[in-house]
Image (cartoon, grey):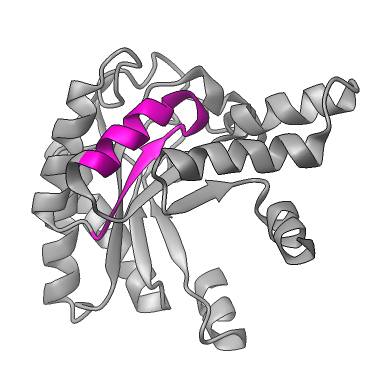
Amino acid sequence: MAVRGMKREVPDLVVMTDVCLCEYTSHGHCGVLDGEEIVNDVTVARLVQVALSHAAAGADFVAPSDMMDGRVAAIRQGLDEGGFEGVGIVAYAAKYCSAFYGPFRDAADSAPQFGDRRSHQMDPANVDEALREVEIDLAEGADIVMVKPALHYLDVIAKVKQRFNQPTAAYHVSGEYAMLKAAAKNGWLDEPRAMMETLTAIHRAGADIIITYYAREAARALRRS
């Protein structure tokens, strides 16, 4: 409904939608469970259905954020067979199991009810796996690859851009945003300058697209400059 409304009011607006199951589950995990384990292939089939529903509503890009194996290829096939060949895929290709998602999970009440997401999100110490995941997602049909979080993984963003030279996004996540907000609230830094310096660093590392809670403030600052 939201996608249809936005496309109706602003037809030229580029709409990208998150594709995951965590927002629809009581347990907060990113897929269908068998006991306490995520069933990869069953989850992927559900993700295809979600992506198709978003495409039918008017999404220009779908962005699977679940980190299941093979989901990019399955979604690409589903979109093509469903007549949505022009809908692109933004793959959360290197999504780390990070402590910096906390403020969002609290606000959205989406924290896992048990365990964590280490089975499918990445080890923060591992860079080589990020490059393998990006390579796989590109081979499966991703149009844009994403690194998440952004600020604490600038080296990963840089290596992804240098290795593949493909459209690269970075997600400046809630915890990274909240740190700046808290420091500014305490008078410890100049928030507008810190915001732009942070976003500039992410772009300098190689991000072509930055997803950030600062989007409106940054856009206004850029218009003024």
Residue, x 37% and y 38% (percent of image)? 147
Depth check, front residue: 82 or 25: 82
> In the rendered image, is residue 70 in sight?
no
Nearer-the-camera pick, 80 or 197? 197
Assess whether residue 146 is covered by the magenta stretch.
yes
| Left/right of residue 154 with respect to residue 10 in the rendered view | left
Is residue 72 one of those drawn in magenta? no
Say if residue 50 shows up in the picture: yes
Is the residue 5 above or below the residue 111 in the image?
below
Is 168 drawn above or below residue 37 in the view shown? Answer: below
Task: Name the side, left or right, on which 110 lies relative to 80.
Answer: right
Direction from residue 71 to residue 192 in the image, left or right: right
- Please give the range of residues in magenta: 143-162
Residue drawn where x is 31% and y is 26% of the image: 121
- How many circles with numbers are drawn on the protein? 0
| Location of residue 130 in the rendering, given as x and y in whole percent from the top left corner | 23, 29
Residue 81 lies in quadrant? bottom left
Residue at the spot x=36%, y=36% of the render? Answer: 157
The answer to which quarter of the image holds residue 40 is: top left
- The x, y position of residue 8, in whole percent, is 56, 87
State the image coordinates of residue 210 (x, y, percent, origin top left). Answer: 50, 49
Horizontal and vertical percent position of residue 173 = 55, 35
Q: Relative to 214, does residue 111 appear above or below in the rendering?
A: above
In percent of the image, x 19 and y 46: which residue is there? Answer: 164
Q: Is most of the magenta stretch helix, strand or loop?
A: helix
Quarter of the image with the C terminus is: bottom right
* Above or below, 207 relative to 76: above
